Amino acid sequence: MTEGQVSLTVNNGIATASFYHPAQNSLPSALLSQLTDAINTAAASKDARVIVLKSEGGRTFCAGASFDELLQIKDKQAGARFFSGFSNVINACRKSSKIVIARVQGKAVGGGVGLAAAADYCLATEAAAIKLSELAIGIGPFVISPAVQRKIGLQAFSQLTIRASDFQSAEWAMQKGLYNELYEDIPTLDQAVLELAQKLASYHPDALTGLKKILWEGTEDWDALLTERAAISGELVLSEFTQAALNSFLKK
C-alpha cells in the first residue's frame, strides 16, 4: 500500500502534480494525502500560475480506490478516513486559486473520474474511456458524485452510475462535458496540454483567480458535504457484500 509516488515540479509558471501506482494508478490513502499536499503546495507557490494534474504510464489515468487497502478497513472511522482522501483531493482542486488542467491519457475508473471532474479543464486521449464501477462492488460514487454531476449533469451521471459494469467512450465523456478536448494519442495530448498551460501562465493572475471563483460558485458547502459522503462509503465498505465483491475482483 506504500508503493507508488507523487511528484511536484514547477517550471515557467506551470506546476505539474503527477502520481503513479503500479496497480493501474490506483490510489491508496498515502498517495491521496501526498497528492492533496502537492496540489495545495502548487496553489500556494508564487512561482506557479497554473496547475497540471496527471498520472504516469500510458494505459490508465487512474483506476480509483486501492482495493487492497479497502479490504484492510475494519471500522467506520477508518473507512471514512480513506474515502476522505478523495474528498481532500477534490477540495484542493476546488479551493486552489489557480486553474487546474487535467491530462487524462487513458482509462479513468471510479475515483479517477472524480479527479478529472475536479479539474477546471480536461484534455484526454481517444482511449480515455470512463466507468463508475462502485455499485458493482457494493458501494456508490458518493464522494465524487458532486464533482462528476456538476460536470456532466444528472442524466449522464445516472447512466454512468447505473451502468456500473460498462465503460463509456472518451467521445461520450466529451459530449457530456467531462472532457473539453480529445486527442488521437499521448504525444499530441501532451503538446496540447503544454500549449494551453503556457497560455494560461501568461495571463493576468488576478483574472485567472476571478475566473476560478466563478467556475466554482455554489460549492462552498463541499467541505461538509464530501465529509458526509465519505462516511457513507466508509460504512458500506464494511458490508459482507462489498468485502466478497472486492475479494472476487482481486482473484480475477
Image (cartoon, grey):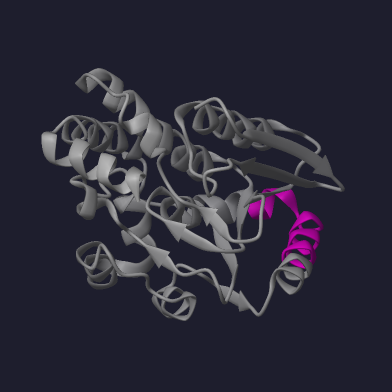
Image position of 20 (left or right of 203): left
Image position of 173 (left or right of 159): right
For the image, the number of numbered tags is 0
Residue farthest along the right direction in this orientation? 12
Position of 103 relative to 138 (above/below): below
Q: Residue at x 55, y 25 (%)?
A: 2
Q: Residue at x 49, y 27 (%)?
A: 1
- Is 136 contained in the magenta span? no
Q: Residue at x 40, y 48 (%)?
A: 111
- Is 201 contained in the magenta span? yes
124 or 94, nearer to the observer: 124
- The spot of residue 225 in percent (x, y) is 27, 38
Image position of 209 (left or right of 90): right
Residue farthest along the front direction in this orientation? 251
Position of 50 relative to 96 (above/below): below
- The spot of residue 213 in percent (x, y) is 51, 50
What secondary structure predominates along the stretch shown in magenta?
A: helix
148 or 239, nearer to the observer: 239
Position of 172 relative to 10 (above/below): below
Tell me where residue 184 sits by quadrant. bottom right
Position of 82 relative to 163 (above/below): above
88 or 212, nearer to the observer: 88
- The spot of residue 176 in percent (x, y) is 39, 75
Residue bounds of the magenta highlight: 193-208
Tell me where residue 69 sits by quadrant. top left
Q: Residue at x 59, y 61 (%)?
A: 59
- The spot of residue 178 in percent (x, y) is 45, 67
